[in-house]
Amino acid sequence: MPRNGLRGMLDMRKLLLVSALLLSFAAFSPLSQSIAGPSKWTSAQISKRINIAGRQRMLSQRMSKAVCYAIVGIDADNQRRIASTSAIEFAENLDFLLNGNAEMGGENEGAARAALDDVQSIAHPLVQSTLQLAAGDLHSVPMQLVIERNLPTLKRMNEAVGLIVQAAGGSGLGADVKTTLDLAGRQRMLSQRIAKDMCFINVGMDVDASLADLRSSMFLFQETLRGLIDGNAKLGLLAAPTPEIKEQLALVAELWSGVEPAFKSTLNEQQLSLAQMLTVVAEIDLVLVEMNRAVGFWAKHAAAN
C-alpha cells in the first residue's frame, strides 16, 4: 500500500517501535491524578475522568484484537503481550472508576456506579479469557468468550461513559467540550475495533457481523475525524481549537489514509495475506498512538479553559 513519507511496508523493527510507543500511553492515564466527588470535580478532573473511562472502550477492543492476531501467528509474542497488558489495565482502571481509593477518592455513584457494576460483571469473562489466551492456552472456549463478550462490554462501558459525563454537570466544562472529549476518545476504540473486525473476517470468525461492524465503524471514524478537525454541529463536535490539536489530527488523518485501503479490501471480501495483515496491525496502532496524543492535547486544553 503506497504512502507518502509514511508509506511503504513496515518491517518488524518498526512494529516493535510501535509496541514501545503504546506502552507510553500511561503518560496520558489519569490514574495518578486526584479526583474528587461529582460536586467538587474541576475541569481538569472531569476531563481526565472522561479520558480514562473512554480509554476503557478502546481496551475492550484492543485485547480482543490482539488475541485474534496472536492466534493466527501474526507477531504472536508481541500480540500476546499486548492482550495481557490491555486486560490488566482494563481491570485496574475499572476498579478505580468503581471504588477510588483513600488517596484519590472519587468513586462514581448512582446510575454511573450501576453501569460500571454491570461492566464489571460482563467484562470479567472477557478479561479472564484474554489472559488465558495471552498465556498461550489457545482453547476454543476462551476465544468464543472473547467473541461473545467484547461488544457487550464495549456497549455498557460506552453507556457508563455517557453517565459519567452527565454526572459532571457542575464541573465547569461546557456540553460541547465534554462531547468533543468523549468522541475524540472514542476514536481510539474505533481504531482497534476496525482492526479486530478485519482479523475476525480474514480468519473466518463471526464474519457477517464483523463485516457489518467494520463498515459502520469505518464510516464513524472518518466522520468523527473530519468533525474533530473542522467541527460538526450535528455530532456536537467543536473544531480543533489550537494549531497543536489541528496539526495532530491532520497527522492522524494522513496515517488513516495509508491504512484505509486494506480495510476497504476486506469489506470487498478480498483475502489479505499474513504480510499485509502484519503491516495493517502495525499501521493502525500508529493511528492509535497519534490519536491518543490528540486526546491528551484536547484534555489539556479543556482543563486550562
Image (spheres, rainbow, N blue to C red):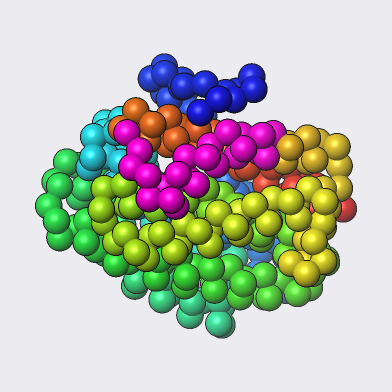
Q: Is residue 237 visible?
A: yes
Q: Relative to 50, is 146 on the left or the right?
A: left
Q: Is residue 63 visible?
A: no
Q: Relative to 234, is 85 on the left or the right?
A: left
The residue at the point 26 percent across, 31 percent down is 77
Task: State the image coordinates of residue 184 (x, y, percent, origin top left).
Answer: 67, 53
The residue at the point 50 percent across, 59 percent down is 215
Q: From this viewpoint, which residue is outermost toward the bottom?
A: 110
The residue at the point 34 percent across, 64 percent down is 208
Which of these two is toward me, 282 or 54? 282
**Secondary structure predominantly adopted by residues drawn in magenta:** helix
- Residue 146 drawn in magenta: no
Task: State the image coordinates of residue 12 (x, y, percent, origin top left).
Answer: 38, 20
Task: State the image coordinates of residue 263 (x, y, percent, origin top left).
Answer: 48, 45
In the image, residue 275 sits, relative to residue 38, either above or below, namely above
Query: Which of the 4 quarters of the picture holds residue 79?
Result: top left
Q: Which residues are magenta?
A: 251-273
Task: State the image coordinates of residue 168 (x, y, percent, origin top left).
Answer: 71, 71
- Residue 267 drawn in magenta: yes
